[in-house]
């Protein structure tokens, strides 16, 4: 996939991996990048010659994905690439006596990580299919391969989105050959979401670089950093992989 002169929508693009992808896609000659999220942060109006547009939306709320899709179709019909990057991770104990008190924030986590990427893709599908070449990239996680105990819902949403991405790829291969479906699986990345947790984190810039390079090389599944090692472990000994991650 070539990003030259393309218009690309990235959710959660004002910081972390999304911001790093915005910078690097601009370096590759994208015509425009549409950044969708709750705040613009320090995103400029242009990165080099690439125009930057911001759409304020909250994809953790019901209806957020549909509203964003309507704006994209009406105002940015030239968009041919959707990168579903926005996400949140809630550390929660689902067997605690007060587990039910956290149901509201967990519902937001499910909406943002799982429902919104699917719904957004469905609603912008007519727009994407009009292009000679289009793509959807769903950013999941290495935790989609093996969950950790401290964030069970996050892990489940990423595994679910990964499964959906694979099935969607099958459909596109059969009936929409101009549409490429990517899944990117980052390891632990140094972002605001992971502040104070873990060691040996990959930088957001390096994570973004590996995702974009994978898309350029048309790799449908992009294992980033240590996720490659985890996948190898899961092939050799799934029980070992589960045991290692279960401590997290």
Image: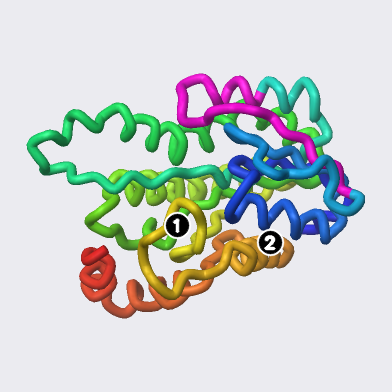
Residue pictured at 38% horizontal, 51% vertical = 159
Mark 1 nearby-residue class (10 Å; few <14, some 14–19, many ≥20): many
Going by the image, does 184 lie left or right of 131?
Answer: left
Locate residue 3, reporting x and y percent. Answer: 81, 55
Q: What element carries label 2?
A: helix
Residue pictured at 25% horizontal, 54% vertical = 150
Please state which of residues 38 and 8 is positioned toward the viewer in this rendering.
38
Locate residue 142, reporting x and y percent. Answer: 42, 62
Q: Is residue 246 placed above or below 115 in the rendered structure?
A: below
Residue pictured at 24% horizontal, 32% vertical = 102
Would residue 121 be visible to someone looking at this image?
Answer: no
Locate residue 41, reporting x and y percent. Answer: 65, 41
Q: Name the residue under label 1.
A: 141
Considering every residue shown, the one lying at the far right of the view is 49
Would residue 103 be visible to someone looking at this image?
Answer: yes
* Residues in magenta, as a range: 50-69
Going by the image, does 37 lie left or right of 197?
Answer: right
Going by the image, does 192 lie left or right of 26?
Answer: left
Q: Is residue 97 placed above or below 189 in the rendered structure?
A: above
Q: Mark 2 points at which residue?
A: 212
């Amino acid at each position: 996939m070539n990003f030259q002169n393309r218009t690309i929508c990235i959710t959660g693009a004002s910081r972390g991996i999304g911001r790093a992808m915005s910078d690097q896609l601009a370096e590759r000659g994208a015509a425009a990048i549409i950044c969708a999220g709750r705040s613009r942060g320090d995103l400029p109006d242009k990165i080099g010659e690439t125009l930057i547009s911001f759409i304020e939306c909250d994809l953790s709320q019901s209806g957020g994905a549909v509203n964003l899709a309507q704006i994209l179709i009406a105002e940015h019909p030239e968009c041919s690439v959707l990168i579903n990057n926005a996400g949140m991770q809630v550390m929660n104990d689902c067997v605690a006596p007060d587990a039910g008190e956290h149901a509201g924030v967990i519902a937001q986590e499910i909406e943002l990580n799982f429902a919104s990427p699917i719904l957004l893709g469905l609603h912008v599908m007519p727009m994407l299919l009009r292009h000679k070449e289009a793509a959807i990239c769903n950013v999941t996680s290495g935790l989609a391969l093996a969950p950790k105990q401290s964030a069970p819902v996050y892990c489940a949403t990423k595994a679910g989105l990964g499964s959906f991405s694979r099935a969607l790829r099958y459909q596109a291969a059969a009936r929409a050959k101009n549409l490429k479906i990517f899944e990117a699986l980052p390891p632990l990345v140094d972002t605001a979401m992971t502040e104070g947790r873990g060691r040996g984190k990959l930088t957001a810039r390096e994570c973004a670089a590996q995702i974009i390079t994978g898309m350029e090389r048309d790799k449908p599944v992009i294992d980033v950093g240590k996720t490659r090692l985890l996948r190898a472990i899961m092939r050799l000994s799934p029980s070992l992989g589960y045991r290692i991650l279960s401590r997290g």
